[in-house]
């Protein structure tokens, strides 16, 4: 469904150039410029798509900007004609036509995204020149091209000719780990730690990143224990073991090690967050309690406070979460991201004044996604039934993920005011940037018609769209919903079965099929099987819990039914869940409880068909 009730709303065809071309020809100048920016110093690289190059260990590094073009030839000769004044340890090599040709080939290939050819050319140059800068560039390009074997060859040359290079050592070690060769990586990692002497702490913290991709987590844990044994006096050594043990599922060891790390460094925020993560595997409550105690002792620990606030939000403890985010906002008043979070939590809590205040303030902070802020300001004003103000905000959304949704909300407001024709016209004339947006607009128009009880026209719009895109998952789902309203159970069932075939992990498709069979047929055992599959895929979804409660009720299992429905209603007091819960309560003789559930739901949803129907059935 498009409008969900949530207030929280990312080849070079190597044209073999003539090796005898003059260095002064523009294309050669461009190629040499590019590569020499890479080779000018050990820590720089050529700009690749996106403006970064792969770094040692598989990360990214900043790139050097081009220097004065007049110096290109001179710098070329400095690198391959004489030793650089800054690097007397570099090899000297004549700048011959063969070398220039390989430069040109490699850099054109890299610029065009063919990192395989570029890396191969650089690898050949590294073998002959034995220049560490060239070997490093070969490694980076091979990593870009996801050719780990070639990257390892290049990185080995890099390390051979620059034996004391920490980035070279780390890169070779990481590539060996990725190749599942821990034994070969071990001496390199040991040397990496030893090279830092008394300042070994940061190197110990790098172990997890270097070893994280290895599939045998128990082997990694054994290796980390061996590597860190000489450094047990450092808290970082215990932190590294805790990380490896946590990844290996050895939670008792992980907890013991992280506590040992914090014994000597009790205010360490990263360690506190890791300890909370480990505790959270057993009990989220324990994790929250621990973080709360840590913050009481370390009120300035902002990273921990942010983690604590996020966990509170995940647990739907919105008032407590907002209080923590507000504390963060006091310390970081110009942080628009935190201000947006405070606003959205306020909106979730229906504190519209606080939400509006923060959202308007965020606009003053030049937030990166102003369209989403405008959309939420539209929500605030729509909740207040200030429709003209809401319309202003919705129509000011110019793009982004909220563009169609904002215009959909505007159309629904028009429909609420009895302007159905205007609502449909707005949607039909709304420009779409792509096919996905066109489908969303059609879905919105169909939903408008469905809510206006014009079921046939709603179905026709969706079916026409589906005819042109027969495998579109969202259209299949919406066609099924529209068909059910027309009592076309065969169409609903076939659409949902096709959707399940296309997306076998689509929980809502299983749920819709199971609920339809439970509500509209006597195929109850089959219906229950589909709902069970949906529940396995999404065990806390209130609508799936409602479906399970309803099929249990139809099967005669009223006590089990009541348990599911009460869980669902507690999570989400939706009117249709209220209708089901009230019916089960009534049939169990709890009529006053049923009446209370129905009347409270009817007060907030006076036009809901399911509620009206069930109340008329039992209270004519």
Image (cartoon, helix red, strand yellow):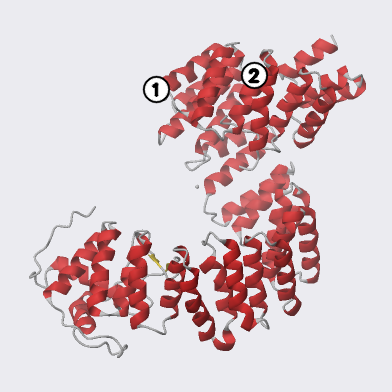
Image quadrant where one finds the C terminus: top right
Residue 588 image offset from top left, x and y in percent: 89, 20
Q: Is residue 255 left or right of residue 59?
A: right
Could you tell me which residue is drawn at 76 percent across and 53 percent down?
A: 284
Q: Position of residue 488 (x, y in %)?
A: 57, 11
Q: Nearer the viewer, residue 217 or 99?
A: 217
- What residue does disc 2 label? 516
Q: Secondary structure at mark 2?
A: helix
Q: Position of residue 161 (x, y in %)?
A: 33, 82
Q: Residues within 10 Å of mark 1 (few under 14, many from 20)?
A: few
In the depicted view, which residue is nearer to us: 289 or 454? 289
Q: Does residue 499 sit above or below 54 in this rendering? A: above
Determine the residue positioned at 39% across, 84% down: 163
What number is the disc on residue 468?
1
Left or right: 458 as drawn, with respect to 283? left
Residue at the image position 31 percent from the left and 77 percent from the top: 133
Q: Secondary structure at mark 1?
A: helix
């Amino acid at each position: 469904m498009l409008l969900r009730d949530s207030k929280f709303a990312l080849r070079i065809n190597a044209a073999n150039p003539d090796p005898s071309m003059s260095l002064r020809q523009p294309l050669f100048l461009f190629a040499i410029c590019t590569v020499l920016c890479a080779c000018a110093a050990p820590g720089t690289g050529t700009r690749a798509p996106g403006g970064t190059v792969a770094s040692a260990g598989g990360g990214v590094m900043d790139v050097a900007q081009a220097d004065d073009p007049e110096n290109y030839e001179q710098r070329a000769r400095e690198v391959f004609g004489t030793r650089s004044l800054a690097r007397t340890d570099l090899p000297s090599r004549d700048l011959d036509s063969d070398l220039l040709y390989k430069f040109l080939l490699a850099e054109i290939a890299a610029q065009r995204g063919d990192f395989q050819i570029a890396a191969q050319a650089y690898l050949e140059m590294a073998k002959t020149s034995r220049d560490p800068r060239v070997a490093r560039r070969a490694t980076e390009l091979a990593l870009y091209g996801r050719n780990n074997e070639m990257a390892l060859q290049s990185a080995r040359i890099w390390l051979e000719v620059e034996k004391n290079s920490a980035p070279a050592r780390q890169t070779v070690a990481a590539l060996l780990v990725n190749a599942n060769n821990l034994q070969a990586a071990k001496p390199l990692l040991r040397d990496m730690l030893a090279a830092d002497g008394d300042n070994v702490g940061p190197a110990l913290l790098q172990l997890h990143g270097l070893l994280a991709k290895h599939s045998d987590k128990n082997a990694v844990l054994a290796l980390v224990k061996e590597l860190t044994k000489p450094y047990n006096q450092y808290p970082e050594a215990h932190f590294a073991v805790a990380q490896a043990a946590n990844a290996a599922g050895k939670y008792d060891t992980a907890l013991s090690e992280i506590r040992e790390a914090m014994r000597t460094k009790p205010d360490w925020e990263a360690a506190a967050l890791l300890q909370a993560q480990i505790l959270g595997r057993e009990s989220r409550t324990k994790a929250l309690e621990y973080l709360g105690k840590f913050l009481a002792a370390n009120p300035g620990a902002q990273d921990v406070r942010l983690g604590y606030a996020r966990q509170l939000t995940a647990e739907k403890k919105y008032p407590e979460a907002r209080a923590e985010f507000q504390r963060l906002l006091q310390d970081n008043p110009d942080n628009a991201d935190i201000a947006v979070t405070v606003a959205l939590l306020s909106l979730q809590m229906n504190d519209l004044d606080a939400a509006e205040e923060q959202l308007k303030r965020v606009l003053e902070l030049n937030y990166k996604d102003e369209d989403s802020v405008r959309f939420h300001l539209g929500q605030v004003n729509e909740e207040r039934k200030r429709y003209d103000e809401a319309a202003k905000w919705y129509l000011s959304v110019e793009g982004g993920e909220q563009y169609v949704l904002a215009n959909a909300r505007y159309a629904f407001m028009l429909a609420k005011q009895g302007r159905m024709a205007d609502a449909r016209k707005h949607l039909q004339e709304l420009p779409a940037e792509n096919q996905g947006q066109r489908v969303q607009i059609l879905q919105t128009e169909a939903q408008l018609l469905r809510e206006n009880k014009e079921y046939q026209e709603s179905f026709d719009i969706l079916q026409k769209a589906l005819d042109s895109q027969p495998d579109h998952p969202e259209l299949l789902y919406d066609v099924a919903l529209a068909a059910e309203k027309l009592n076309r159970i065969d169409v609903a069932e076939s659409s949902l079965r096709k959707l399940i075939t296309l997306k076998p992990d689509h929980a809502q498709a299983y749920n819709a099929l199971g609920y339809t069979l439970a509500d509209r047929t006597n195929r109850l055992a089959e219906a229950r099987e589909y709902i069970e599959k949906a529940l396995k895929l999404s065990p806390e979804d209130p609508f799936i819990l409602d479906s399970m409660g309803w099929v249990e009720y139809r099967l005669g299992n009223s006590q089990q039914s009541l348990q599911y429905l009460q869980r669902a209603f507690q999570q989400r007091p939706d009117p249709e869940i209220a209708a089901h819960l009230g019916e089960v309560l009534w049939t169990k003789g709890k009529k006053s409880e049923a009446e209370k559930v129905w009347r409270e739901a009817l007060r907030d949803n006076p036009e809901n068909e399911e509620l009206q129907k069930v109340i008329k059935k039992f209270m004519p």
